[in-house]
């Protein structure tokens, strides 16, 4: 399908989420009109205010709409009317659900709901869906090697099928992501004769970095992954053990750029695209702060920590680099800008 270009109208689901706010602002900055879905009228107001403050000249090109339950078959029927493309970010994110069906079924229904609604709108030429590296491999059980877009995390699905509610919470989440993405590709295959749009799936690793939502009252209001950064690095008392110990991560601004590039790049159609930067440990993040003199009161670590990192699987970012000509930010960039963000909110006085 042809690329989507500025001045087009893009529907962004989950528009008030961590990635969503960044994507909305990026699209508006590039000249797009944006329709953003959220789950309550109050959230429309909050997001509209963020747009008005950050991009006053673009506020007329943003409209919010309420979709209270994304799993309803007709949930997006009105939202998709008269748009040119969709970025679908709305999805359950909890890993604490006891019964895996309580996460998997809503995720699958949410995916089929948006695609079925798009199917009835011939003006729409591209749908970009956010999945996860969790749909590619499970960091807790998969062999240590480099994984690419050709890999699928069927191992997590099998574990959940065998263990049900006794499966680890993270494995349930990974099975959820795997099955929801499988459903998306199966839908496209089933309806290829009638679909006027193509599909791109973006698979981010753990997404960290500054938060675009400037309305958060305290660190308790942080989205899940920035909350992980806070809890592991800045919260006091400090945790006895930092989790996860080793991880793949990507800066939220790189995810935003990949989402927008996935709309604008014709060759991205029909592709899975991993959004990942590098492997690191939390001690390496502390070391960045130490080297850049970001926070005087943050504990110090030995530079030898870099040599002690356990072996860990890696999710290749070569396709994103080749398709979009981009280089990913490092944890040095992410840590520096996260500290600057949290400082501006007055949250790091205890570490300065």
Image (cartoon, rainbow, N blue to C red):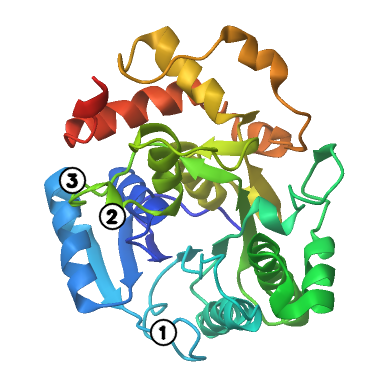
Residue identified by numbered label 3: 55
Inspect this view and state whether residue 217 appears.
yes
Q: Which mark is residue 235?
A: none
CA gap, disc 1 to disc 3? 29 Å
Residue identified by numbered label 2: 221
Count residues near mark 3 (Cα–Cα under 10 Å), then give few for <14, some for 14-19, many for 20+: some
Q: Is residue 311 left or right of residue 231?
A: right
Residue 170 lies, in percent from the top left, at 65, 60
Q: Nearer the viewer, mark 1 or mark 3?
A: 1
SS for callout 2 = helix
Q: Is residue 337 left or right of residue 278?
A: left
Give the tally of numbered discs.
3
Count residues near mark 2 (Cα–Cα under 10 Å), then give few for <14, some for 14-19, many for 20+: few
Give the residue drawn at x 26%, y 34%.
342
Residue identified by numbered label 1: 69
Residue 123 lies, in percent from the top left, at 48, 73
Q: Quadrant of residue 62?
A: bottom left
Rendered view: 72 above or below 79: below
Residue 131 lies, in percent from the top left, at 61, 59
Give the residue drawn at x 84%, y 62%.
155
| Camera-side residue of 258 and 253 | 253
Residue 203 lies, in percent from the top left, at 63, 51
């Amino acid at each position: 399908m042809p690329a989507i270009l500025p001045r087009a109208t893009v529907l962004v689901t989950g528009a008030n989420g961590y990635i969503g706010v960044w994507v909305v602002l990026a699209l508006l900055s590039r000249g797009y009109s944006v329709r953003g879905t959220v789950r309550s009228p109050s959230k429309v107001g909050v997001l509209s205010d963020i747009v008005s403050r950050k991009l006053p000249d673009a506020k007329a090109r943003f409209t919010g709409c309420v979709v209270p339950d994304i799993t309803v078959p007709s949930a997006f029927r009105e939202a998709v009317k008269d748009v040119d493309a969709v970025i679908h970010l709305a999805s359950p994110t909890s890993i604490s659900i006891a019964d895996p069906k309580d996460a998997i079924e809503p995720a699958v229904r949410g995916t089929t709901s948006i695609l079925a609604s798009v199917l009835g709108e011939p003006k729409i030429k591209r749908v970009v869906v956010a999945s996860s590296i969790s749909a590619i491999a499970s960091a807790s059980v998969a062999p240590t090697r480099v994984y690419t877009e050709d890999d699928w995390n069927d191992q997590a699905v099998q574990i959940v099928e065998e263990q049900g509610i006794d499966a680890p919470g993270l494995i349930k989440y990974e099975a959820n992501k795997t099955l929801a993405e499988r459903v998306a590709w199966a839908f496209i295959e089933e309806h290829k004769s009638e679909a006027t749009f193509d599909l791109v799936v973006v698979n981010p690793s753990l997404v960290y970095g500054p938060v675009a939502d400037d309305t958060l009252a305290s660190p308790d209001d942080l989205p899940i992954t920035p909350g992980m950064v806070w809890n592991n690095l800045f919260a006091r008392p400090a945790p006895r053990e930092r989790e996860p110990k080793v991880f793949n991560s990507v800066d939220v601004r790189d995810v935003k750029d990949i989402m927008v590039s996935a709309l604008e790049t014709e060759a991205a159609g029909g592709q899975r695209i991993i959004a990942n930067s590098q492997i690191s440990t939390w001690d390496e993040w502390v070391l960045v702060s130490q080297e850049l003199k970001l926070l005087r009161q943050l504990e110090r670590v030995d530079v030898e920590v870099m040599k002690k990192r356990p072996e860990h699987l890696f999710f290749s970012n070569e396709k994103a680099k080749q398709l979009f000509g981009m280089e990913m930010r490092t944890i040095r960039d992410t840590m520096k800008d996260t500290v600057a963000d949290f400082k501006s909110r007055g949250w790091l006085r205890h570490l300065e």
